[in-house]
Image (spheres, rainbow, N blue to C red):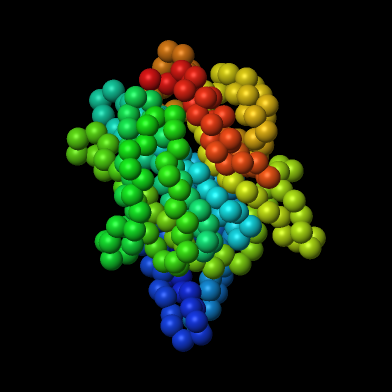
Amino acid sequence: MKKSNLNLFYLLGGTMGLLFLLSSFTNNISAQQNLTGNSNGTPISLQPDINAENMFNTKTMTMGNNVKTLVILIPDEGHHAAGEKNEARFLDQHFIPDNVAINTGTTLLWFNGDVGHDRTIDVKDNKGNSVFNTGKIIDSQPSQSFTFNTPGEFNYEAEGDPGVTMNGTIMVGNIGSPVAPSSSAAITINSNLSIIDTVGLLMVPTQDIDSYIQQITDAGITVDNTYDFKDLRGGQKGTGDTQTLIVWTTLNKDLNETLSSLSGLSASLPYS
């Protein structure tokens, strides 16, 4: 079976099969994941991966069955259209990441890093029914959270510039293995399962990366891994032409406290 046409099957209750059509982000997943399974309807395993470089290249991240909460970043200027005469975007993603695969029972929320812009995200099931709406998310603030207890594929979107719809995909299913963090922000249970309270992403100017990492760690948040990239803008006063994606994690830390610290840092970034 070709990876680009791969369907993900989830066996529910022993008698009902739920078909996960990977549709728009199958290619993104297959570019970074090892997909295994067979044709009898057993769950197909996605290899968990929270590596920032892989996420940047595939626009996709896969959580493990040991991650409780995921925070998706709404990046600064991600609401612009591609191909503008004067490129405003920093990277070719509406969200960081655009597409996620999470284990059933994972809680998800969005953090608005789009300076000076409010965002409202609507999450729909594969029939087009709205299952969750964040309400208005003020910049440098998190959205309300939603726990995905039902397996399936969900699409989410927000309005950007006129004519621009920001969109992403959430696949919820039976991920059979834990994600292995690069950092020590996990506790090992039974020698083979590590628990991570929260995984999230942040974009900062590379030129002051040491300062930002220090602020993050001082707040009790662990920087798991980073990736530097040349932004599409080619440079901007105050930010330089290279940005860094940060994957951060927490363990045994209150989520509201974590988000409050990130809000303060986000508000201080030199994006505009």
> In the shown orientation, is residue 220 left or right of residue 130?
right
> In the shown orientation, is residue 126 left or right of residue 71?
left
Residue 195 drawn above or below residue 201: below
Give the residue at x 51% y 53%: 107
Q: Position of residue 98 (x, y in %)?
A: 41, 47
Farthest-out residue, top: 237
State the residue in front, 66 or 57.
66
- Rendered image quadrant of residue 174: bottom right
Q: Position of residue 104 (x, y in %)?
A: 51, 64
Residue 219 drawn above or below residue 110: above
Q: Is residue 37 visible?
A: yes
| Total marks in image | 0
Q: Position of residue 186 (x, y in %)?
A: 71, 48
Farthest-out residue, left: 163
- Rendered image quadrant of residue 231: top left
State the residue in front, 90 or 183.
183
Give the residue at x 32% y 64%: 126
Quadrant holding the C terminus? top left
Farthest-out residue, right: 191
Give the residue at x 53% y 78%: 42
Q: Position of residue 39 (x, y in %)?
A: 49, 81
Give the residue at x 49% y 19%: 268
Residue 232 drawn above or below residue 157: above
Q: Is residue 3 visible?
A: no
State the residue in front, 258 or 233.
258
